[in-house]
Image: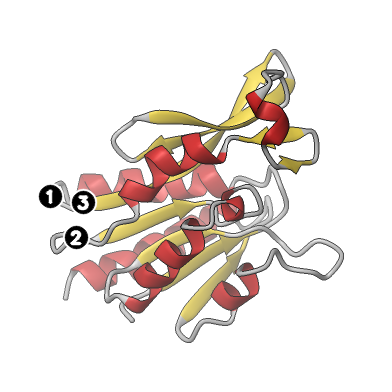
Amino acid sequence: MAGCFLVTGPPGVGKTTLIIRVLESLKLAYPHLKVQGFYTREIREGTERVGFEVVTIDGRKAMLSSSQINSSESHRWPTVGRFRVDVSSFESLALPELQIKEDTDLFVIDEIGKMEMYSASFFPAVLRILESNIPLLASIPIPKSGRDVPGVARMRNHPGAVIFTLNKETRDSMREEIYSRLTHLFQR
């Protein structure tokens, strides 16, 4: 495998920000780099988090979850905490981004977590990427009460996976380390 870089840490520590900054630096250094994938961004109203959206590398967006949806359809959606997960919205945007193409240089998946795992097609797509020879930069949640989200333990234990556990003190050095490891792969 070319490289599997997994970023983990507590909620709010900056996993998504780190991944976006690494990606920005890579695109500056390698303008023709073909990157596929998505990141997850909070939706806020004032200081309150009211949901999450999925954003593709090229900027397209779709709802992942919301605490404010009350349609008759949303009552059938799975819940994570106070959020209802819109699996079909997530799948319509995220799954095409996880299709392996011949010219893909890097996959970015932020995040491989509980909400995303409600899609029956998501984790098989992630496993196909892991089995390819295309580098992967992804975030995974930190285990809660010592228990991983199903599937995440498989990522954590994948041969060749390098895990970066973030905290506020190590964010900048971790960003530099991940960037350095990825640029080493692209220089070959």
Contact (Cβ within 8 Å) of mark 2 with mark 1? no
Labels 3 and 2: the sequence-earlier one? 3
Mark 2 is on which residue type? Lys
Residue behind mark 1: 32
Q: Which residue is mark 3?
A: 29
Residue depicted at 16% across the width and 76% down the height: 188
Q: Is residue 134 left or right of residue 176?
A: left
Query: Secondary structure beneath disc 3?
Result: helix
- The residue that disc 2 covers is 101
Q: Quadrant of residue 91?
A: top left
Residue at the bottom extreme, as displayed: 159
Identify which amino acid the numbered label 1 is placed on.
His
Relative height, residue 42 to residue 184 (above, below) = above
Q: Is residue 26 left or right of residue 163?
A: left
Q: Residue at x 32, y 68 (%)?
A: 135
Crowdedness near tag 2: few (<14), some (14–19) or many (≥20) residues, C-alpha within 10 Å: few
The foreground one among 59 and 19 is 59
In this rendering, position of residue 62 left or right of residue 117: left
In this picture, residue 155 sits left or right of residue 114: left
For badge 3, the amino acid type reads Ala
**Label 3 CA crowd tier, 10 Å (few <14, some 14–19, many 20+):** few
